[in-house]
Image (cartoon, rainbow, N blue to C red):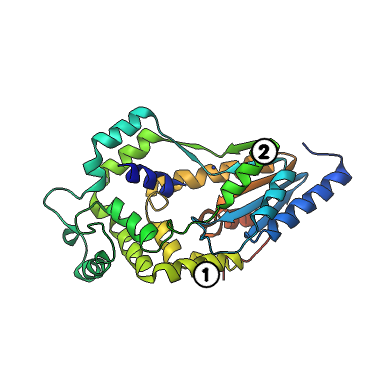
Amino acid sequence: MIKAIGVVFALMFAWPAMAQDEVTEVDEVVVEARRSGAPTWEVTRGGSTLLLVGTIQALPKSLEWRPDALERAAERADRVLYSQAVNLSPGDILRLIWRQRTLTRLPRGTTSADYLAPEWQTRLVALDARTRDDLMTQSFFSTSAELMFGLTRLNRDRGPSVEDSVRRTARRGRTPSQRIGEVRGDAVIEDLLTMAPETWVPCIQLAIVAAEAGEPGMLERAAAWRRFDVPTVMGSPLELALSQCWPWGDPDWGIQLRAQWLTGVEDALAQDGTTLAVVPLRVLAESGGLLDTLQARGFEIVGPAWTR
């Protein structure tokens, strides 16, 4: 059950000086953010500068990047924005424990073969031999997590995250920080407990492809992130699966999470000074995403190409 709760969190997801000095400070923040190795975009309006740092889930330990440079950028920023927090109450956790079979197992008397086409079932059976979990009978929620996080080693060889580095520095330097929204735990649990297995099929198919690519696919995705090759990251099997699966691929949750980021960015651009926002790369670079939206509204965006 503790593993299931951890998966929920893993899948969900965090004053200006005088004019002349302010320009210098902004330049320093931009330089340090880019020096870190994290893809970063700069958006400016009037006296407001917004730095969008694109993150991907679970950077591997073997990836060489410079969190220290990003930490220095966070120290110089006027404020920092993080992703949403999931607000789970003790009652929510008790409900998870009470309903754990629903969350972790397929409906009684069914297996994955009742929902997947024969080709996909055959590929899932082949992957089942590589894990201790029973991918045939456990819930598609659990299966998707094992395929994306376990068989790719995404969570097993995880290094420091972009958000952790920024949050630690902001807390130490008392930089004003906030999450761009909250997600109610009871709503999350209700959604997970009532989703029909059929709705998970597109997610499971992409998660199977990601698991087949395995650790090499996960490492290539991370390497593309480090070299600012955003289109390759977005087209990688693992990123496609994470984007399709719950919560980002859910028609209700996906819209809500993206809308909160758009509101947070608009609010940041209405304030003077420099805001450093740590944003999931998929929110930024997907078709019709945050960068496309800002560009369509006439903002000049300086940073890596996010489309081919």
Q: Which residue is mark 1?
A: 232
Identity of the residue drawn at 59% across and 65% down: 226
Quarter-of-image position of residue 308: bottom right
Asked where in the image residue 140 lies, by quadrant, the reply is: bottom left
Residue 171 lies, in percent from the top left, at 64, 37
Is residue 107 among the parts visible in the rendering? yes
Q: Taking the image as drawn, is residue 299 in sight?
A: no
Q: Which-is-in-front pick, marks 1 and 2?
A: 2
CA neighbours of label 2 inside 10 A, class few (<14), some (14 to 19), many (20+)? few
Q: Are the residues at dot 1 and dot 2 in contact (C-beta closer than 8 Å)? A: no
Picture quarter containing residue 240?
Answer: bottom left
Q: Nearer the viewer, residue 307 or 23?
A: 23
**Amino acid at circle 1:** Thr
Of 299 and 185, the residue lying toward us: 185
Q: Secondary structure at mark 1?
A: helix
Residue 70 tag number: none
What's the distance in space between the residues labelled 1 and 2, CA to CA?
Answer: 35 Å
Instruction: Give the residue drawn at x 66%, y 47%.
Output: 276
Q: Position of residue 209 (x, y in %)?
A: 35, 68
Q: Is residue 81 above or below residue 59?
A: above
In the picture provided, is 137 more to the left or to the right than 57? left
Image coords of residue 56 (percent x, y)? 52, 57
Instruction: State left or right for residue 139 relative to residue 65.
Output: left
Identify residue for label 2: 172
Task: Give the vertical position of 91 relative to 147 (above or below).
Answer: above
Question: The N terminus lies in which quarter of the figure?
Answer: top left
Q: Amino acid at mark 2?
A: Arg
User: Which circle's residue, 1 or 2, is located before the other in the chain?
Assistant: 2
Mark 2 residue element: helix
> Residue 288, how many percent across, how many down?
52, 57
